[in-house]
Every structure is written in C-alpha cells, then in structure tokens.
Image: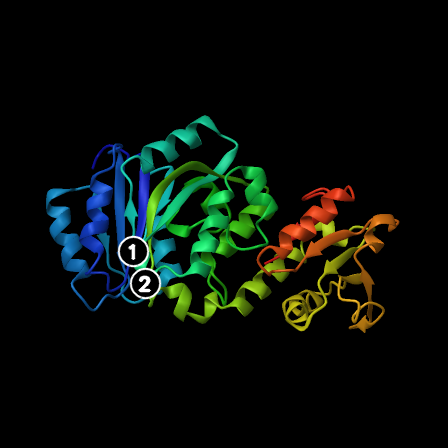
C-alpha cells in the first residue's frame, strides 16, 4: 500500500451482501493490478462490511470506509476525499467488470489527455429480467461513443452508465465532486462537466456487466423520476448559449406530454419563438402565448431558429432528424434532441 495506485475504485455499498463477493471477484480478475478499492459502507444492515473486511485481509488494496448512513452522494464524495490515485473508476456492488476494463480505460485516458472521463459499452444481465424499454435505452447509450456523440446526446438521457466510468480526479475535485439534490447525481455531474467544457468518451468494448433488478435505486428513488430529469435538463439548457442567441429557438412537438416536459424551461425564463408540429389540428393554434407552426416553416425561416426536438416516440425522433438534415440543419449547431 506504500506505492501510489494508478486507479482508485469508488465502490459505495448498501446491503449488498448477496452480490458483493462476485463484484469483488471481478475486480480482482483485472489485468491491471495497480488500483485500490475504496469500499464505502453506507450503513449496511447485512454482512456487507464483514465481507469487505474478510477480503481485505488477503488483499491490502481493499480499504473499508464506514461513515454510517450518509447517503450515496456523501459516500461517493468521501471516497473521492480518501482516494490516492489520479484516476477514479466507479463501480457498483451488484455489477461485474470484465478483465480488461481498468487497463483499457486507463490507456485511453493516457492516450487522450484532452478527455476528462471515459466510459465503456455495457451488457445487461440477467437477460430474463431485462425489459424491452431498458434494452432499447442501453442500445441507444451504447451507440454514444465519441466525445462528439456524447455531447450531441447529453440532453436526451444519461449517455453513460455510472458504474462504467473512469474520471480524472483533478477534474472532479475542481468541479466540486458530486452534488446532492432532487436529481440523479451522475447525470448532473455529466451535465456539469459538459458545461465546463470537459470532453467525455467511451472505449468501444463492452467492459461492464450491468445488473438489472426490480429494486434498482433508479426505479424506486424519486431523484430518478422523469420529472427530476426534466427539471435537471431544463436547468442546464437554460445556461446553454445556443438557446439564448439572437436567432431564438423553437420546440418541435406541441402535445400535452411535450408541454409538461417543456414547462421547466419556461420556469427557467426561456420561451420558444414557436412550437413545431405535424398535426394539422394544432397548426395555427397558440400554446402558452406562442404560435404552432408546420414543420415546413423551418425551411425558409429567417433567421433559422435553433430547434429542440422534444419528440420522444421511438422512430419519430429519427424522422424529425431526417427532415432537419434534409433542410440543411446541422446537429449541435442548429438542433438538439431533448429526452
């Protein structure tokens, strides 16, 4: 433990005794061995802490932190404070690393000094528990690999699986670590990094097995509800210079569900110049004081507004993008999709 490790693995634990040994086995099986495991026990009531102590007897790279019940965000920040390595790798106690994960991500960051965070593609398991909607989300997420793809999709959903990422500790500390609030802590950090000009990427290999389970925090905690994501996205969209430029912006979509998702933008003081819709029954109406215009209006609009695509139906968003690209609109420069 005298030698400074290359990587500090942040492993928050809460009642994870049923999966923790398997998780630690996957870490022990890494082809890169210069790491420390910061196992932060968040007040577990099962044998989690005992498992970590037992494993640490034979592997001094494992360190147990026992702050009591402090919550996930505080547990992560305590891990960052205790970290000795320049690189931070996230891991969850119910997931599994493939053997090359740490080495490939470390190598990527060494080879790309302009990148602050690198993730990887993921595999869902066990297959019998994975529903189609979640499978589609991971298919979309796995398609976001390059810094440009991640930046272009940052407002759709979280383009990175939290337990798959490796980050430069200096960047995370400079940005203040994880923030605690009524929002998903990982997605908030990605948005904050994006707005700070940080580049994020993925290695193209699937290096994490991401466990699906009915009691996953993202399913039961209100911080991960759709409304929390909408409010968080709106808070960062409100800081985006593209929406405050003189050209103005429009929202593609004028249905009731879209309006509910756009409302937090209005609350941030941003109002679109118009709504775009293809439903002839809506064209010509006024919604919240702004006209509903047909999609073709965008062809000759002068100046061309920035377009926020709020259409979420599977396949429909791709059709909107095809229209915009055909009219000369460019991703990130002239339009973005919003989840």
Q: Quadrant of residue 148?
A: top right
Number of residues whose C-alpha sits closer than 10 Å to that of mark 1, classed few (under 14), some (14–19) or many (20 or more): few
The C terminus - image quarter: bottom right
Q: Position of residue 242 (x, y in %)?
A: 73, 49
Front-most of residues 139 and 82: 139
| Lower sequence index among marks 2 and 1 | 1
Q: Report whether 313 appears left or right of 259.
A: left
Residue 113 vs residue 216: left or right? Answer: right
Residue tagged by mark 2?
Answer: 213
Way the structure is coloured:
rainbow
- Most foreground residue, 186 or 306: 306
In the picture of the structure, the residue carrying the numbered disc 1 is 126
Image coordinates for residue 208, horizontal then vertical, percent: 34, 45
Instruction: Provide residue 146's location: percent of width, then percent of height.
Output: 53, 37
- Identify the residue at image location x=18%, y=59%: 49
Q: Quarter-wise, where is residue 12 in the image?
A: bottom left
For the image, the number of numbered tags is 2
Q: Quadrant of the N terminus?
A: top left
Q: Indicate the secondary structure of the residue bearing disc 2.
A: loop
Which quadrant of the figure has residue 73?
A: bottom left
The answer, for residue 84, to whether it is visible in the render is no
Image position, residue 2 (x, y; %):
21, 34
Query: Neighbour class for label 2 at 10 Å: few (<14), some, many (≥20)?
Result: few
């Amino acid at each position: 433990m005298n030698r400074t490790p290359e990587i500090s693995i942040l492993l928050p634990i809460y009642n994870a005794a049923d999966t923790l040994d398997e998780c630690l086995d996957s870490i022990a099986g890494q082809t890169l061995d210069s790491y420390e495991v910061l196992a932060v026990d968040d007040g577990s009531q099962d044998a989690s802490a005992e498992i970590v102590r037992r494993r640490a007897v034979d592997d001094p790279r494992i360190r147990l932190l026992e702050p009591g019940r402090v919550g996930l965000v505080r547990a992560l920040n305590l891990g960052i404070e205790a970290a000795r390595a320049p690189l931070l790798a996230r891991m969850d106690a119910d997931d599994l690393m493939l053997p090359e994960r740490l080495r490939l991500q470390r190598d990527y960051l060494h080879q790309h000094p302009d990148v602050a965070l690198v993730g990887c593609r993921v595999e869902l398991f066990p297959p019998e528990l994975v529903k189609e909607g979640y499978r589609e989300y991971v298919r979309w997420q796995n398609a976001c690999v390059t810094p440009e793809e991640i930046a272009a999709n940052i407002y759709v959903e979280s383009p990175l699986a939290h337990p798959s990422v490796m980050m430069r500790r200096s960047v995370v500390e400079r940005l203040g670590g994880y923030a605690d609030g009524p929002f998903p802590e990982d997605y908030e950090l990605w948005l904050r990094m994006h707005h700070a000009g940080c580049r994020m990427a993925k290695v193209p290999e699937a290096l994490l097995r991401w466990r699906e389970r009915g009691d996953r925090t993202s399913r039961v905690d209100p911080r991960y509800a759709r409304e929390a994501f909408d409010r968080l996205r709106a808070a960062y969209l409100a800081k985006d210079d593209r929406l405050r430029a003189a050209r103005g912006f429009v929202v593609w979509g004028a249905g009731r569900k879209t309006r509910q998702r756009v409302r937090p933008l209005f609350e941030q003081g941003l109002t679109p110049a118009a709504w775009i819709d293809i439903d002839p029954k809506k064209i010509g109406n006024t919604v919240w004081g702004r006209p509903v215009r047909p999609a073709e209006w965008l062809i000759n609009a002068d100046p061309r507004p920035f377009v926020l695509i709020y259409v979420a139906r599977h396949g429909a968003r791709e059709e909107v993008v095809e229209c915009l690209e055909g009219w000369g609109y460019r991703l990130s420069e002239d339009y973005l999709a919003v989840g």
